[in-house]
Image: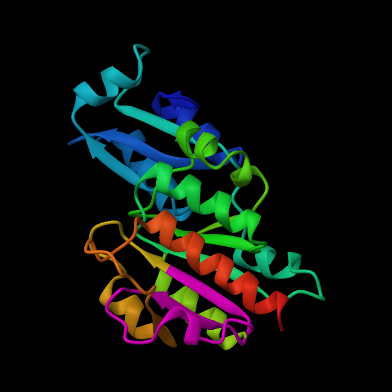
Amino acid sequence: MDNLVFGIRPVAEAIEAGRQIEKIYMRKGADGQLISELRDLCFRHRIRIQEVPIEKLNHLTRGNHQGVVAQIAAIDYVELSDILERVPEDETPLIVVLDGVTDVRNFGAIARSAECAGAHGLIVPVKNGAPVNADALKTSAGALTRIPVCRVGSIRNTIKALQAEGMQAVAATEKSRTLLYDADLRKPTLLVMGNEETGISKEVLKTCDQQVAIPMIGSIGSLNVSAAAAVLLFEVMRQRIHD
């Protein structure tokens, strides 16, 4: 795996130096004062810790990891306010929200479509989201280095905050009776996409202003999440071009 820092003190120093951490792998059952201090540091900086068997850590690195390996983020994440501030005055905000998309190639493909369709940013969860790694960057064809990406602790609360700023949240779900083409996507819009297997979580779905479905003729009944995101994004573009 690329971009690794290992050892308790080197990982703590990386966090304190402001390096953006994708996640930290920690040996199951690890304890002691330094480990406790590192846990507190991660909590303060909202960094995800994944507890794993020591075999996993040994597989990641042959170095003296002391039970801790950190994966450094391949991009610089931004704050939510940064996405909003970067929207040009003559453009209507369009942000893609990923609620539990975990496959890195899907993530990269969505980022590529979002950048091509003129979206202003991506919002992803700190937990249960695909990391920005080499595979994601490659699949995005460089889009992930161009489009701002914001990590948040709560997708639901973030949607609510953006609704308060005047944005509508449009959820993509095949269960909706409203077709994508009947929705007004010319307004400031959050496009909400869900997990590859289970879709958008119930609590997030309840928060959204509208649910839309892509019409299907074939027998399979649903698209891959990255393909669905592309259809939605370019329908937004079509409506706005013809506005």
> Is 233 in front, or is 152?
233
The magenta stretch is 166-192
> Is 63 in front, or is 235?
235
- Magenta stretch: residue 177 in it? yes
Q: Is residue 43 above or below residue 94?
A: above
Examine the rendering and report whether any part of residue 48 can be seen: yes
Residue 11 as seen in the image, left or right of residue 120: left
Residue at 56 percent across and 54 percent down: it is 113
> Is 216 in front, or is 114?
216
Examine the rendering and report whether any part of residue 152 can be seen: no
Q: Position of residue 32 (x, y in %)?
A: 27, 34
Residue at 36 percent across and 17 percent down: it is 61
Image quarter of residue 92: bottom right
Q: Position of residue 165 (x, y in %)?
A: 62, 85
Q: Is residue 60 above or below residue 182?
A: above
Q: How many marks?
A: 0
Residue at 37 percent across and 77 percent down: it is 213
Quarter holding the C terminus is bottom right
- Magenta stretch: residue 7 in it? no
Q: Is residue 137 above or below residue 151?
A: above
Quarter holding the N terminus is top left
Q: Is residue 224 above or below residue 71?
A: below
Q: Position of residue 71 (x, y in %)?
A: 44, 33
Q: Position of residue 102 (x, y in %)?
A: 34, 50
Residue at 35 percent across and 20 percent down: it is 65
Residue 59 as seen in the image, left or right of residue 88: left
> Is 114 in front, or is 167?
114
> Which residue occupies the extreme front position in the image?
217
